[in-house]
Image: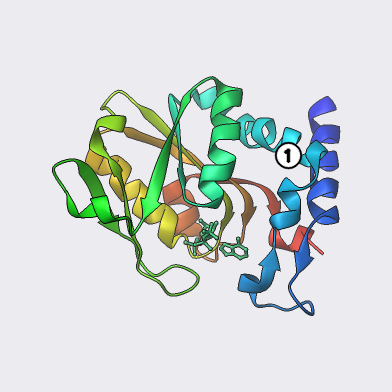
Amino acid sequence: MKADSSRRRLVERLRGSFAWRGDRTDDRSRADVTGWWRDPGLLAELGPGLADSFREEAPTVVIGVESRGSLLGPLVALDLGVGFVEVRKDHPPLADSDVWLRRTTPPDYRDRHLGLGFPRRLLSGSDRVLLVDDWIDTGGQALGALGLVEDSGASWVGASVIVDSLESSEIRRRLNVRSLVRQRDLP
Ligand SMILES: O=P(O)(O)OC[C@H]1O[C@H](OP(=O)(O)OP(=O)(O)O)[C@H](O)[C@@H]1O
Ligand SMILES: Nc1ncnc2[nH]cnc12
């Protein structure tokens, strides 16, 4: 009962500080989520809210793709009492494959194939990895992150996101995505 009411309050806050750039449109790249970090009450609830979806699976580390993943991931990691790995996009050290794991993503929602990577020493075979992000759309970036985690030998737990607008249920299953809201819950 308490969980239901706090989930409802979270959805209301997400709706209240969400906006479109310009007129409301079906072009998701014009969704403006920046108000979500401006509301102190919402900011305080996002870490525990995103952590709750996977708490029972006991992840040992959170990863996030810059930049929204780097903003939200540490909030979730703090709540779970684990560390955080920042996945960089097209960063110069990606060239050094002895030190960095790297993967090129399938096309993302902007049709980009991004180079993702992080230093290989940051994950070990015993890690259970939770990806955190604000929005999953094509799943391209998350699939790139899944590839990196597989290359590291660690286990993938799932992806905890605020909004899920994936069209492919096969990708949702493969990534084990759990979300706080559906896009249709937003204004
Ligand atoms: O499911 P996909 O189609 O891969 O899209 C999802 C990703 O795209 C957005 O990041 P964006 O690249 O816009 O970067 P930003 O966080 O730096 O704004 C979002 O924060 C996710 O990380
Ligand atoms: N942050 C975001 N806002 C809107 N659409 C997106 N698709 C992927 N990321 C998004």
Count of marks overlaid on the render: 1
Residue situated in front as seen by the camera: 54 or 169: 54
Q: Position of residue 176 (x, y in %)?
A: 48, 44
Question: Residue, x 42% and y 58% (percent of image)?
Answer: 141
Q: Residue furthest left?
A: 98
Question: Residue, x 70% and y 58% (percent of image)?
Answer: 33
Image vertical order of residue 12 relative to residue 21, above or below: above
Q: Residue furthest front?
A: 92
Image vertical order of residue 22 relative to residue 136, above or below: below
Residue situated in front as seen by the camera: 183 or 117: 117
Q: Position of residue 4 (x, y in %)?
A: 81, 34
- Identify the residue under disc 1: 43
Instruction: Identify the element where label 1 is drawn.
Output: helix
Query: Could you classify mark 1 by the number of other residues whose Cα lies within 10 Å: few (under 14), some (14-19), or many (20 or more)?
Result: some
Question: Residue, x 65% and y 77% (percent of image)?
Answer: 27
Quarter of the image where one finds residue 78: top right
Residue situated in front as seen by the camera: 55 or 83: 83
Q: Quadrant of the C terminus?
A: bottom right
Left or right: residue 80 compared with residue 61: right
Q: Is residue 31 visible?
A: yes
